[in-house]
Image (cartoon, coloured by chain):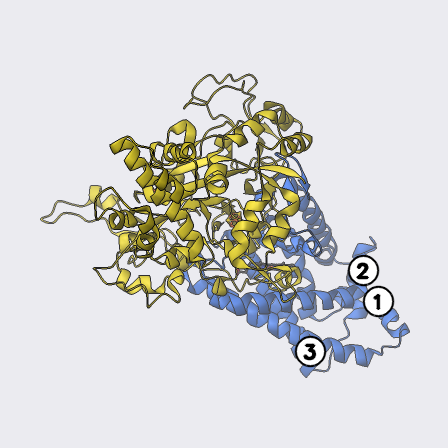
Chain colours: A yellow, B blue
């Protein structure tokens, strides 16, 4: 057993209102630069829909992620190391920018400079690739809220095989939002695809990053990621990706997308896992059992044996404490209501989703709040979002996994309704969830009340480690020319004591070494 | 040795080699961030498929041929039993194939850069210089391989150009040798020094980064924060 810690995320799809605040704030912070105009580290897709880039989920086509070969060994779907080197001059699996969209701006100047005339001046779109005027024909979120769905939605890869069940007629239509960031996978195929060794997973917190000084622009990570969450900066010629806002995470702050989430759907917390068993779990022969396999890699932070090994593996005591309070571990492992996105890609993703339930509630409430627990599953089976569709997204096609999670959520609702309205702890409703009443109430508090400090349980990185910064050569990853800026001074709102902040020192390789500010450990802003 | 010979066939090569080495050291130390293939496949992929593959495989084969032709003395190939005729035949045939692939690929790449506004937009001035010099070198090389050696009577460049080139490396330059070669050969041997001089300051640095270490590397890399790569 080798214990490592991972900062994971859960998103509660029931509560996403599709406002795109997360995408916009993320873009303002990270990809508001030349060469990244088309890049959205965080994007929100409407399902059913094509997604961004279009049809990214069709990995028969894009060849992202892992597969098992005939002898059951884990292999990169796009081929091994020799094949990569032979196709290095032209990557057969790389999307072109039109698969994302051609980024544009408007010639706003005409609004100001236009001469006096009878007609109002109009700012016309112009391409950010060429500066020329262009017709906008696709965008990062073109099929938002089912816009144009009769034409686009049937091509949603997740609808494959469901055409009979899902008729996209107006009366029976359904939709939900799917916000996406990099999954910071336990078995990241982007890292495995990078021939230069520029990509890596951090041992301490599992964040997957691109070393900008080592990237040589071979662009195999872009095609290797089955979630298409590595992007090619066409200005710098280097790959960039979601950093899980590590400069914030290191200070114990939630990511920008989480902090600004209007629906308060996001949860951040630690998961302890056994690094020795990652390979084995990713090689699980039965796709439908990959969820179970990944859950077995997670370690119970309350288990004294795990704690002891964690200490031996250098995980600080307060992190073990944080891991025990992790909302991610609770939703994914304890209550099993959160599920991984496309587990069949075998990267063991670490951003999990609570499947959307809303439409089923109508079905449950037809005869008032007294929903009969026995009716739970028939109701779920008749809900508008077909479980088979959700299963294609969150359970490698296994509808039973979805039914279990939804059943538990629906059971929680009817239990809580009786508690709130009638003031009774209905044992029968509790039994339907197979959870103790105290657990149901805890789950309710986390999902429905969703207090800031319960959603974001992120420990600070240790200042002893930060101190080593000034001794070790390394790259900051953001502080490059044209990059979003230094990862140094991020002020912590309360009680942060900046003990030794030095100005960036040039370390020769064309970038500055900016040590993290040293902080006295103190409670976060929400505490 | 005339002044012109001294400048073109001795001074230029040494100046270029100096710049080449110093330039790479400087670039690696100060601009790792700029060290990249600057791929434009994201912007255009169909023409690149042919252009990049033909050009690179052709150019790498041609470079391989040059290494054999210039660095290995005639006496050595003869000593292992390869006659000048056999060597010449092989060099002409392989050189023609590689040269044609390289030229075809190069034309596609240039056409692509000119034709697609997106790609044109990413083209820098160093790119233009590199393309111009490369175009001249490749064209001259093709005239030699096809014009002189495949269609014409053939010119044995190894006792003149080859010896001059090695002489430069042993610090014993003999410019009169290259000066006796046909003009096309003189030009083809002179222009690369300009390419080498701009090489470290252009996108061509990517050629040194062929990531062969990838073969046999463990797939997943972990690093400690701000530390060095570890398994
Ligand atoms: C073995 C080492 C080499 C590797 C791995 C390599 C790889 C690459 C890659 C990946 C690209 C980007 C293609 C794209 O996606 O746009 C590229 C472009 C290019 N390479 Fe190489 N290359 C190598 C050697 C060379 C050499 C020796 C030369 C020239 C003498 C060269 C000249 C070029 C040029 C001119 C381009 C730009 C093509 C264009 O976009 O118009 N490369 N190379
Ligand atoms: S989701 Fe993130 S960590 Fe996983 S393969 Fe893609 S880029 Fe890598
Ligand atoms: S900010 Fe939150 S609610 Fe709004 S789209 Fe993003 S994830 Fe959904």
Reading the image, the residue beneath label 3 is B148
Label 2 and label 3 in one chain = yes
Q: Quadrant of residue A75?
A: bottom right
Q: Residues within 10 Å of mark 3 (few under 14, many from 20)?
A: some
Spatial CA distance of label 1 from label 2 is 9 Å
- Indicate which disc, 1 or 2, sits on the residue closer to the N terminus: 1
Q: Is the Cβ of the residue at disc 1 closer than 8 Å to that at disc 2?
A: yes
Spatial CA distance of label 2 from label 3 is 23 Å
Helix, strand or loop under label 3: helix
State the residue in front, A197 or A422: A422
Q: Quadrant of the C terminus of chain A?
A: top left
Q: Residue at x 72, y 52 (%)?
A: B11
Q: Residues within 10 Å of mark 2 (few under 14, many from 20)?
A: some
Q: Quadrant of residue B32?
A: top right
Reading the image, the residue beneath label 1 is B73
Residue B130 screen position, x and y as percent: 57, 57
Residue B28 screen position, x and y as percent: 65, 43
Spatial CA distance of label 1 from label 3 is 21 Å
Q: Is residue A242 left or right of residue B177?
A: left
Residue A211 to residue A313: above or below: below
Residue A361 screen position, x and y as percent: 28, 47
Q: Residue furthest front?
A: A428
Residue B54 screen position, x and y as percent: 59, 69
- Indicate which disc, 1 or 3, sits on the residue closer to the N terminus: 1
Q: Residue at x 73, y 79 (%)?
A: B154
Q: Residues within 10 Å of mark 1 (few under 14, many from 20)?
A: some
Helix, strand or loop under label 2: helix
């Amino acid at each position: 057993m080798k214990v490592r810690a991972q900062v994971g995320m859960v998103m509660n799809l029931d509560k996403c209102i599709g406002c795109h605040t997360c995408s916009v704030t993320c873009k303002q912070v990270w990809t508001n630069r030349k060469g990244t105009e088309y890049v959205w580290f965080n994007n929100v897709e409407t399902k059913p829909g094509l997604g961004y880039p279009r049809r990214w989920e069709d990995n028969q086509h894009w060849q992202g992620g892992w597969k098992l070969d005939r002898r059951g060994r884990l292999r990169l779907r796009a081929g091994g190391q020799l094949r990569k080197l032979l196709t290095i001059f032209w990557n057969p699996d790389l999307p072109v920018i039109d698969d994302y969209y051609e980024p544009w701006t408007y010639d706003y100047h005409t609004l100001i400079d236009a001469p006096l005339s009878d007609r109002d001046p109009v700012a016309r779109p112009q391409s950010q690739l060429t500066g020329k005027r262009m017709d906008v024909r696709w965008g990062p979120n073109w099929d938002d809220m089912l816009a144009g769905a009769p034409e686009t939605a049937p091509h949603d890869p997740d609808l494959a095989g469901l055409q009979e069940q899902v008729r996209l007629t107006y009366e029976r239509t359904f939709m939900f939002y799917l916000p996406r960031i990099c999954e910071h996978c336990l078995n990241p195929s982007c890292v495995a695809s990078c021939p230069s060794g520029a990509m890596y997973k951090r041992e301490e917190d599992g964040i997957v990053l691109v070393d900008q000084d080592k990237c040589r622009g071979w662009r195999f990570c872009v095609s290797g990621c089955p979630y298409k969450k590595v992007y090619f900066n066409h200005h710098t010629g280097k790959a960039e990706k979601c950093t899980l806002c590590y400069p914030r995470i290191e200070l114990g702050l939630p990511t920008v997308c989480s902090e600004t989430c209007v629906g308060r759907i996001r949860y951040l917390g630690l998961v302890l896992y056994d690094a020795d068993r990652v390979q084995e779990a990713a090689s699980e022969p039965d796709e439908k059992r990959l969820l179970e396999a990944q859950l077995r890699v997670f370690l119970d932070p309350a288990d004294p044996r795990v704690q002891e090994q964690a200490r031996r593996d250098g995980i600080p005591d307060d992190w073990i404490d944080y891991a025990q309070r992790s909302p991610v571990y609770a939703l994914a492992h304890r209550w099993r209501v959160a599920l991984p996105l496309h587990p069949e890609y075998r990267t063991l993703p670490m951003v999990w989703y609570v499947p959307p339930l809303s439409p089923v509630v109508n079905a449950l409430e037809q005869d008032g709040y007294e929903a009969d627990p026995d009716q739970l599953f028939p109701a779920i089976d008749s809900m508008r979002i077909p479980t088979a569709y959700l299963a294609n997204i969150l359970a490698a096609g296994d509808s039973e996994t979805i039914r279990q999670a939804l059943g538990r959520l629906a059971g929680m609702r009817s239990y809580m309704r009786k508690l709130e309205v009638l003031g009774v702890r209905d044992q029968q409703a509790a039994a339907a969830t197979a959870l103790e009443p105290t657990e149901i109430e805890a789950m309710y508090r986390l999902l429905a009340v969703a207090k800031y400090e319960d959603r974001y349980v992120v420990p600070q990185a240790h200042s002893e480690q930060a101190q080593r910064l000034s001794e070790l050569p390394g790259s900051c990853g953001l502080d490059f020319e044209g990059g979003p800026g230094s990862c140094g001074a991020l002020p912590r709102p309360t009680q942060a004591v900046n003990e030794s902040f030095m100005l960036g020192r040039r370390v020769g390789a064309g970038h500055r070494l900016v040590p993290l500010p040293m902080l006295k450990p103190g409670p976060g802003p929400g505490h | 040795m005339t002044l012109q010979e001294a400048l073109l066939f001795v001074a230029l090569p040494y100046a270029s080699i100096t710049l080449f080495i110093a330039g790479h050291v400087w670039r690696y130390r100060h601009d790792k961030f700029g060290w990249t293939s600057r791929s434009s496949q994201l912007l255009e992929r169909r023409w690149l498929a042919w252009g990049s593959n033909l050009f690179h495989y052709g150019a790498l084969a041609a470079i391989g041929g040059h290494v054999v032709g210039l660095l290995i003395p005639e006496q050595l190939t003869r000593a292992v039993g390869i006659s000048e005729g056999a060597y010449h035949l092989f060099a002409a045939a392989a050189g023609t194939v590689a040269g044609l692939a390289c030229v075809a690929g190069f034309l596609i790449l240039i056409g692509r850069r000119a034709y697609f506004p997106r790609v044109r937009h990413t083209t820098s001035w160093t790119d233009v210089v590199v393309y111009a010099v490369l175009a001249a070198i490749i064209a001259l090389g093709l005239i030699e391989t096809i014009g002189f050696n495949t269609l014409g009577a053939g010119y044995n460049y190894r006792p003149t150009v080859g010896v001059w080139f090695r002489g430069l490396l042993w610090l014993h330059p003999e410019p009169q040798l290259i000066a006796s070669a046909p003009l096309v050969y003189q030009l083809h041997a002179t222009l690369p020094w300009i390419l080498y001089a701009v090489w470290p300051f252009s996108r061509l640095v990517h050629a040194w980064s062929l990531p062969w270490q990838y073969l046999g590397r463990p797939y997943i890399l972990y690093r400690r924060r701000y530390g060095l790569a570890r398994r």
